[in-house]
Image (tube, coloured by chain):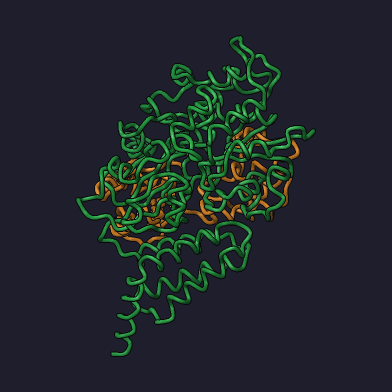
């Protein structure tokens, strides 16, 4: 369900581009939907296609091409840990394995309570802050050693009353 | 009650380690930043927007013509900071200024080359310097519409840039009839969402048009067929950020900061095995040994083994070659690599080069857009062969196989990603062949036993 408030957010993105180039706003609209609903469903793609005047399949092509769009529902907190070379040299895999042990899941999986999804990801562009992790697409977390990872996970659990 | 946003904000970068330190040399872009002084008032207090006022003659004076601006940038020796190092003034002169229709200016802030994190700090802590540089470029090339394409993973930076754009519009630096002149320029921010390939300029244009980011065949070049099929100039964030200083101080002064053919300061992102990873803005031509010293030296007192000097795509250089280099386009190129984006990935003597290459090869096969067969198939092949060498399954013919696959990718694809995947493989084999051979010999012995 895409609300009027969401459509107003779409409109602010569409206004950046020439009137005949509304399709340019597709990436922003998809990321707005993902922020509000946690993932991009085919129903959402259909609404965006209509708003932007483009074929639904062209919207789907964008969803499936870019790594960060969730094509299925994910946990409430999606944790993307960078393991690319600069992070690898400074504990990126240790961070990933630390979270696997702490959450009791393997990378790519979601915890049974639906709170956390853990993923390995490619370069986040913050290499001097290694190891780095991105939470829910929009929150970069820097210098994530084991202690900080524990603080983050425990803190997020507490906000959900599951400490 | 603590919210999730409050929890997450505790882990946000502060810039202290990477940008606000006293280990820059003659900084221009990062000068006097502290994380709190990013807004327009602070930027103006640092002399910001004076270059724009100068060219428009906003404070009296004659102003500068389009030709004068381009000539000044040419004189400065400024070369593209995104990776290719193409002379910026020359690129600007390619723009068909008399073209009657819409022309576009695009800033490439899709910073995803592993090792590179300089543009992030510019946009977060000094966003107006990029806005001013873009306005000056737009003026010089007669462009009225521009976009800054920002890496989707740095969403907080995108939001910061949007806030800065609002300030610049309110102050009359962006919009119609800028500072009362006849020149108008609209500028907007656009974010990616996780695709390394969109750092390639034509893939970026496709993405900006709302499509999957698959590179276009060149020619035609963006200067004649760019965004929405119209003439377009694309420069890197740091390139635009260098422009206001050049206009204020003159092309000659900028050139003198660096060395001939390598004008100005450059920001180097230093990551990996150093004591103080971070961004370092120093004059081009500074010895590598000095940069390593600024970054605190090799971690834990270890010895330097190798450096990837210009982002993950650039060929690795062993320590003894690197220690003789100066940090500029010509010196690194002469040594057999590329200055690229200026991202140095430093590796100490404990590092396993096959393991390092394995992670890079995984990255390139993951990020190949799939359009050209040699890259789509070849990057996967490279990764699988390196993977089996690393995991005790290597075969005697594998080194030649890797070299042959890499050779057959290079120069046979639409964009440079294929070369970017192949070059690290060939360089690792060239300089560290014995490490590959040792693993393969161990595997052969084990299977014979």
Percent position (x, y) of residue B227? 69, 42
Q: Which residue is drawn at 73% across and 37% down?
A: B96
Q: Give the quadrant of residue B426.
A: bottom left
Q: Which residue is drawn at 40% across and 68% down?
A: B429
A34 is higher (above) or lower (below) than A18: below
Q: Can residue A35 be seen in this view?
A: no
Shown colour of chain B: green
Direction from residue B106 to residue B276 in the image, left or right: left
In this view of the protein, which residue sits in the foreground, B242 or A71? B242
Chain ID for orange? A
Direction from residue A154 to residue B252 in the image, left or right: right
Percent position (x, y) of residue B148? 58, 37
In this view of the protein, which residue sits in the foreground, B198 or B419? B419
Q: Name, please, the residue furthest toward the front.
A: B260
B52 is higher (above) or lower (below) than A90: above
Direction from residue B132 to residue B138 in the image, left or right: right
Q: Is residue B428 visible?
A: yes
Percent position (x, y) of residue B445? 30, 85
Percent position (x, y) of residue A8? 63, 33
B395 is higher (above) or lower (below) than B92: below
Q: Name, please, the residue furthest toward the right.
A: B100
Quadrant in the picture for the N terminus of chain B: top left
In this view of the protein, which residue sits in the foreground, B410 or A104? B410
Q: Name, please, the residue furthest toward the bottom.
A: B449
Q: Which residue is drawn at 63% across and 32% down?
A: A12
Direction from residue B58 to residue A98 in the image, left or right: left
């Amino acid at each position: 369900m895409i609300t009027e408030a969401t459509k107003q957010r779409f409109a602010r993105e569409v206004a950046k581009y020439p009137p005949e180039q509304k399709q340019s706003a597709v990436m922003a609209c998809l990321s707005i939907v993902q922020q509000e609903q946690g993932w991009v469903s085919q129903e959402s793609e259909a609404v965006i296609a209509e708003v932007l005047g483009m074929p639904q399949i062209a919207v789907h092509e964008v969803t499936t091409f870019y790594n960060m769009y969730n094509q299925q529902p994910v946990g409430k907190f999606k944790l993307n840990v960078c393991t690319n070379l600069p992070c690898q040299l400074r504990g990126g895999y240790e961070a990933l394995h630390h979270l696997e042990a702490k959450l009791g899941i393997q990378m790519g999986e979601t915890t049974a309570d639906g709170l956390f999804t853990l993923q390995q990801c490619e370069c986040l562009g913050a290499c001097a802050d290694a190891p780095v992790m991105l939470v829910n697409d929009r929150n970069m977390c820097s210098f994530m050693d084991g202690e900080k990872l524990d603080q983050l996970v425990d803190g997020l659990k507490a906000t959900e009353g599951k400490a | 009650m603590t919210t999730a946003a409050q929890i997450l904000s505790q882990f946000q970068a502060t810039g202290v380690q990477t940008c606000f330190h006293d280990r820059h040399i003659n900084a221009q872009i990062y000068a006097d930043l502290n994380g709190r002084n990013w807004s327009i008032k602070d930027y103006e207090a640092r002399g910001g927007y004076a270059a724009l006022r100068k060219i428009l003659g906003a404070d009296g004076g004659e102003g500068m013509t389009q030709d004068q601006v381009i000539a000044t940038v040419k004189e400065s020796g400024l070369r593209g900071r995104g990776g290719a190092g193409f002379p910026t003034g020359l690129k600007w002169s390619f723009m068909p200024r008399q073209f009657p229709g819409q022309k576009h200016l695009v800033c490439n802030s899709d910073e995803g080359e592993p090792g590179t994190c300089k543009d992030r700090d510019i946009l977060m802590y000094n966003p107006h310097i990029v806005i001013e540089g873009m306005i000056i470029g737009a003026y010089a090339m007669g462009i009225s519409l521009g976009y800054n394409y920002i890496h989707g993973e740095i969403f907080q930076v995108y939001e910061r840039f949007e806030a800065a754009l609002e300030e610049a519009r309110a102050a009359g630096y962006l919009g119609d009839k800028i500072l009362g002149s006849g020149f108008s320029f609209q500028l907007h921010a656009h974010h990616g969402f996780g695709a390394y390939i969109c750092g390639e300029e034509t893939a970026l244009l496709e993405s900006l048009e709302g499509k999957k980011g698959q590179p276009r065949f060149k020619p035609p070049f963006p200067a004649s067929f760019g965004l929405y099929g119209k003439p377009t100039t694309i420069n890197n964030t740091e390139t635009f950020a260098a422009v206001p200083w050049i206009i204020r101080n003159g092309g000659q002064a900028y050139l003198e900061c660096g060395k001939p053919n390598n004008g100005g300061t450059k920001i180097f992102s230093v990551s990996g095995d150093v004591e103080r990873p971070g961004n370092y803005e120093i004059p081009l031509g500074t010895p590598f040994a000095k940069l390593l010293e600024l970054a605190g030296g090799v971690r834990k007192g270890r010895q330097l083994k190798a450096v990837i000097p210009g982002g993950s795509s650039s060929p690795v250089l062993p320590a003894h070659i690197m220690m003789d280099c100066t940090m500029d386009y010509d010196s690194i190129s002469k040594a057999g690599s590329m200055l690229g984006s200026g991202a140095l990935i430093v590796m100490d003597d404990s590092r396993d080069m096959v393991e390092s290459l394995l992670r890079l090869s995984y990255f390139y096969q993951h990020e190949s857009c799939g359009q050209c067969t040699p890259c789509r198939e070849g990057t996967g092949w490279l990764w699988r062969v390196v993977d089996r060498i690393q995991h005790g399954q290597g075969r005697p013919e594998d080194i030649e196989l890797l070299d042959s696959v890499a050779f057959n990718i290079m120069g046979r694809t639409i964009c440079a990603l294929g070369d970017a995947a192949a070059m690290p493989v060939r360089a690792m084999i060239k300089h560290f062949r014995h490490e590959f051979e040792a693993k393969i010999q161990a595997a052969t012995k084990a299977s014979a036993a």
